[in-house]
Amino acid sequence: MILGKIFSPSMIKVPLEGEDKEEVFEELVDVYVSRTDRSLREKILTAVNERETKLSTGIKRGIAVPHARLDEIREICGVIGISPAGVDYESLDGQPVHIVFLILSPGGDCFSYLRVLRRLALLMENPDFYPALLQEKTAEGIHAVICRFEDALTDALP
């Protein structure tokens, strides 16, 4: 299990309070630095915002996957935020975002980064994944959904 380890219940924020992507980035980064290294807050925010200026990470069906790679990050990690109300995210499909997966990875570790993105993409292809996440109201419930869907995905892969 990869995603279940990265997105532990302590790295899940529900509900998000931010109304736009900048506020959401701050919320998610604050969750991360409150459990790791507070001195990285501004550097992470800058990296996430710079990446976002290249192309929106709001991809489809109310999901966004902002990400950044920094040398100060020792191992791949992430934070999930759920916004039942939706966030004005300037998404590629123009729709509000309800689920945000923030991924942070070491600067030189492309393999782990791409592996996590691939697994997330495979989960998002399952039409039941998105509604199952939105149904949950607690970090533990969201984590259980991720683990359940990831286990099913792992069982299905050759």
Image (tube, rainbow, N blue to C red):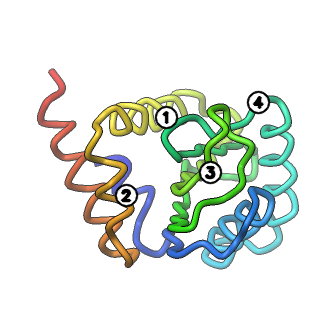
Q: CA distance from mark 4 to mark 3?
A: 16 Å
Foreground label between 2 and 4: 4
Foreground label between 4 and 1: 4
User: Where's residue 68, x and y in %?
Assistant: 71, 43
Residue 103 is labelled as none
Q: Quadrant for residue 18, please give it.
A: bottom right
Tag 3 and tag 1, C-beta contact below 8 Å: no
Secondary structure at badge 4 equals loop
> Nearest the camera: 133 or 7?
133
What residue is shown with label 4?
A: 55
Vertical comparison of 81 with 58: above or below: below
What residue is shown with label 3?
A: 96
Q: CA distance from mark 1 to mark 2?
A: 14 Å
User: Where's residue 139, x and y in %?
Assistant: 40, 74
Foreground label between 3 and 2: 3
Vertical comparison of 19 with 129: above or below: below
- Which badge, 3 or 2, comes first in the chain's sequence? 2
Query: Position of 113 compared to 19: left or right?
Result: left
- Which badge, 4 or 3, comes first in the chain's sequence? 4
What residue is shown with label 2?
A: 5
Tag 3 and tag 2, C-beta contact below 8 Å: no
Amino acid type shown at disc 3:
Pro
Mark 4: give few (<14), some (14-19) or many (20+) Cα within 10 Å.
few
Q: Quadrant for residue 115, please give it.
A: top left
Tag 2 and tag 4, C-beta contact below 8 Å: no
